[in-house]
Amino acid sequence: MPISAPRLIVDGLSAGYGAVRALDQVSLSLEPGETVALLGTSGNGKSTLINTIMGLVPPRSGTIFLEENGVRTPLAGRRTESIADLGLALVPEGRRLFPRLTVEENLSLGAYRGAARGQRHERLAECFDAFPALKQRRRQLAGSMSGGEQQMLALARALMSAPRILLIDEPSVGLAPILVSRLIDTIAAMKARYRLSVLMAEQNFHQAVRIADRGYVLVQGRVAFVGRTADELRNSALVKTYYLGT
């Protein structure tokens, strides 16, 4: 059943690994029902930002919180499972499936949080309806599938948790252009179907802005440009110089 999403707000966030600061005073927001693109080349902090929001990387400073009905819920300092219980789901870079488990077993593991456990059979039916190829391969080991099929499985597994906010990290990596286009279309369809908010980190500028309402460009761990619309992103001099090669 479609559910409404809260607002996600990141303010002055810094994070890193050891002596390396990967994020420096990053601020952004994700409004209910939006698709926001997080753009930038590899090594500029996109994955670190996604992982910090999900509690996988501890922040050094700044705040992350959800805002709903005037109430703010801090995320910084929470365990990842606690953040997932609030309705955030991650589709990680590299998919990170369980290769020796079947498609159906991978999907079932996605329904681990309390709000989804009781709906496991209904969510499974919805995923198979949305991804017919997964239904046909429900008994197949995930590790024996193609890259495109594995990416669809990773997306479906995240949907099994009945999320309100979907964080997607580099979905196009390793996929042929036609598969990237199909995947981006699927993300847009799932977002509309479940009334999700989507924050998508992506290097493929053209595919990302095709479904994004707006976006942010990260350069060396900082927000270098804020595009209030997809057209502003397309027309940005910084984007043209650094990411489109013009």
Image (cartoon, rainbow, N blue to C red):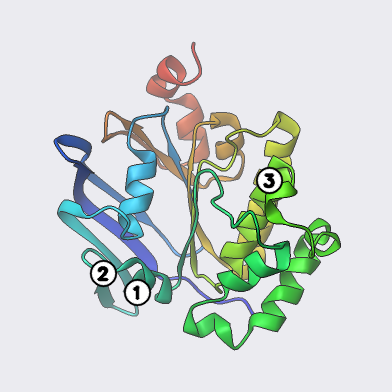
Left-right relation of 70 to 84: left
Report which residue position mark 1 lands on.
82
Q: CA distance from mark 3 to mark 1?
A: 28 Å
Classify mark 2: residues with Cα within 10 Å, few (<14), some (14-19) or many (20+).
some
Q: Earlier in the sequence, mark 3 or mark 1?
A: 1
Q: In the structure shown, which secondary structural element does the residue marked by tag 1 occupy?
A: helix
Q: In x, y percent, where is residue 119? A: 63, 85
Pointer 1 and pointer 2: residues touching (CB < 8 Å)?
A: yes
Work out whether mark 3 precedes mark 2 in sequence or the reverse, and give the earlier one.
2
The numbered mark at residue 11 is none
Helix or strand or loop: what does disc 2 sit on?
loop
Residue farthest along the top direction in this orientation? 246
Comparing 18 with 195, the one in front is 18
Is residue 185 something one can see in this rendering? no
Query: Outermost residue, front direction?
Result: 100
Residue at the bottom extreme of this rendering? 118
Q: Residues within 10 Å of mark 3 (few under 14, many from 20)?
A: many
Q: Position of residue 117 (x, y in %)?
A: 56, 84
Question: CA gap, disc 1 to disc 2?
Answer: 6 Å
Residue at the image point whose x is 69% and y is 54% from the top:
142
Disc ID at residue 183: 3
Q: Which residue is mark 2?
A: 78
Of residues 52 and 137, the one nearer the viewer is 137
Residue 142 in the image: above or below residue 72: above
